[in-house]
Image (cartoon, helix red, strand yellow):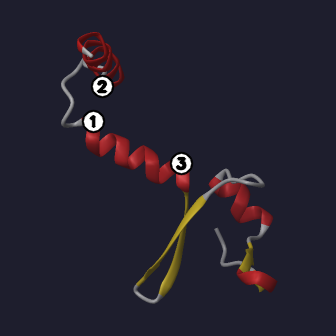
Amino acid sequence: MNIQRGKLVSGGRLQVPADIRRALGLNDGDSVTMEVVDGELLVRPYRDVIAEVRAQLRQYIPAGVSLADELIAERRATSETE
């Protein structure tokens, strides 16, 4: 992709060119993360960051285990003893 020019507008909003939004799969209202890396602004779709974190955490969860099911079972057991 070629370098494109965006624009910082009132209120600190950043206008991102349509080609870049399409390339990143971004739509109006989507969340992004922003960080400064080596003096440059890195903007990433929030969903991509969440997917990376989930993939990193998945390595610590045995195959076939559902943490949601375990939490529900734990909460039910706790409520039965109260």
Single out the residue that lies furthest toward the bottom: 39
Relative horizontal placement of residue 14, taking residue 81 as reference (left or right): right
Q: What amino acid is found at the position of numbered circle 3 in the picture? A: Arg
User: Is the residue marked by circle 2 packed among few (<14), some (14-19), or many (20+) residues within 10 Å?
Assistant: few
Mark 1 surroundings within 10 Å by alpha-carbon count, few (fewer than 14), some (14 through 19), many (20 or more): few
Residue at the spot 29% in from the left edge and 14% down from the top edge: 73
Q: Position of residue 46 (x, y in %)?
A: 54, 54
Q: Can you say whether 69 is above or below 39 in the image?
A: above
Q: Quadrant of residue 11?
A: bottom right
Q: Quadrant of residue 55?
A: top left
Nearer to us in this view, 64 or 18: 64
Rendered view: 4 above or below 68: below
Query: Which residue position is annotated with label 3?
Result: 47
Sequence-first disc among 1 and 2: 1
- Label 1 sits on residue: 58
> Given contact means CB atoms under 8 Å apart, are the residues at marks 3 and 1 in contact?
no
Q: Nearer the viewer, mark 2 or mark 3?
A: 2
C-alpha gap between disc 2 and disc 3: 20 Å
Residue 14 place in picture, x, y as percent: 72, 77
- Name the residue carrying label 2: 67
Judge by depth and name the residue closer to the eye, 66 or 37: 66
Query: Which of disc 1 and disc 3 is earlier in sequence?
Result: 3
User: Which residue is at a point 63% across and 56% down the rendered structure image?
Assistant: 31
Q: Tell me the quarter of the image containing the C terminus.
A: top left
Residue 72 visible? The answer is yes
In the drawing, does residue 37 fall left or right of residue 64?
right
- Which quarter shows the N terminus? bottom right
| Kind of element beneath mark 3 | helix
Quarter assignment of residue 68:
top left
Outermost residue toward the front in this view: 82
Distance in Å between CA atoms under marks 3 and 1? 16 Å
